[in-house]
Amino acid sequence: MPKEKGRVAVAMSGGVDSSTAAALLKNEGYEVIGLTMHLFERKQDGRGDFGRCCSPEDVRDARRVADQIGIPHYVINLRQAFTEEVVDYFVDEYLRGRTPNPCIRCNDRIKFRLLLNKAEELGAKALATGHYARIELAPLPRRYLLKRGKDRRKDQSYFLFSMTQEQMARVLFPLGEKTKEEVRQQAGELGLRVARKAESQEVCFIPDDNYRGFVEDRKGKELSRPGEIVNRQGKILGFHRGLYSYTIGQRRGLGIASPHPYYVLALDTGKNRVVAGKKEELLANGLIAYRVNWISFAQPKGKMEASAQIRYRHPGAPALIAPLEEGKVKVDFKIPQKSVTPGQAVVFYRGDEVLGGGWIEEAF
């Protein structure tokens, strides 16, 4: 591990990854404490419908693993901050006609700010998580670098582009050099009760992955009103139920009678319109990103080439990145890319190294 050994707090979700990370650190001689975040419950009486991020079962699993490996365990109440910083953001972005990424937001505002601070209050020198990513220290100039995890299928560096140098100096990713199969195997060898526990692939606080229903429950009468579905020329093709129900690239649920499929190309909040078109119209030559955070260097010296990844499962596309004012960049793809979605992140790579990233403001 790159950090000095001592007391380390591990963010324990009750899953196999964070549980294995805690056990490995304990076996390597660290003084480990487990922290489980209580993040969200939909019912104010506290009696249920927690979502998958902090269900009673997950908290029990985390506590049982902590007991099993012999470390202290604490539950940290971050519900108010999570609601304000992640849940409200998620809903508001949909109402603005944008597609949010709550996992990045949670890492940025909750895990590597509030939880990291809580870990330090408990005397920990570092916070460890079960992310599949790597942090390395470059000697000249002395700077922390963020790199993809060894397991490219599970790599989570895309969700971590907003990390600062100060945070990276205090964070450990024990699973960065391992594959998911290796982690499950080690969990089994260690006898961890969660070794075969299934993992969720969707947003943790959305019951049954029903995004539309969740937004409706949270906002009620504040929802955007129904309106027209039009093509690029403004011809009416049909009618939508509210902009929050649609995302860029969506094909199903448009209700347009046509011999060829239509896709959502854009969401026009000013005119309350869904703009739809043929598949080839989804292609964009580039994008503008804002709130760009650079990791490998403080600021780029000028235009540079890199691979631009515009969503988690996107393979990345060669692009020319040009700095703009106010922390923005212009990204020109060498080959047009489809479904560039405002509200999602664009992350810049050179090989396995994360140069930086930002939030997609618009496509062109």
Image (tube, rainbow, N blue to C red):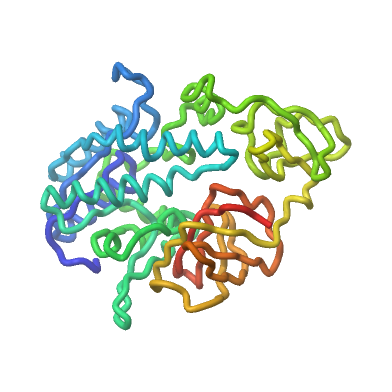
Tell me if I can see residue 219 in this picture.
Answer: yes
**Residue 348's spot in the image, x, y percent?**
51, 65
Most foreground residue, 14 or 349: 349
Tell me if I can see residue 312 in this picture.
Answer: no
Q: In this view, does 78 lie above or below 186?
A: above
**Residue 56's spot in the image, x, y percent?**
29, 27
Q: In this view, does 209 lie to the left or right of 24?
A: right
Return the residue found at the far bottom: 140
**Residue 340's spot in the image, x, y percent?**
63, 52
Q: In this view, does 76 lie above or below 6?
A: above
Residue at image location 31% in from the left, 74% down from the top: 143
Return the residue found at the far right: 259
Quarter of the N terminus within the rendering: bottom left
Residue at image location 39% in from the left, 56% down from the top: 132
Quarter of the C terminus within the rendering: bottom right
Most foreground residue, 28 or 210: 210
Q: Quadrant of residue 71?
A: top left
Q: In this view, does 147 lie to the left or right of 306?
A: left
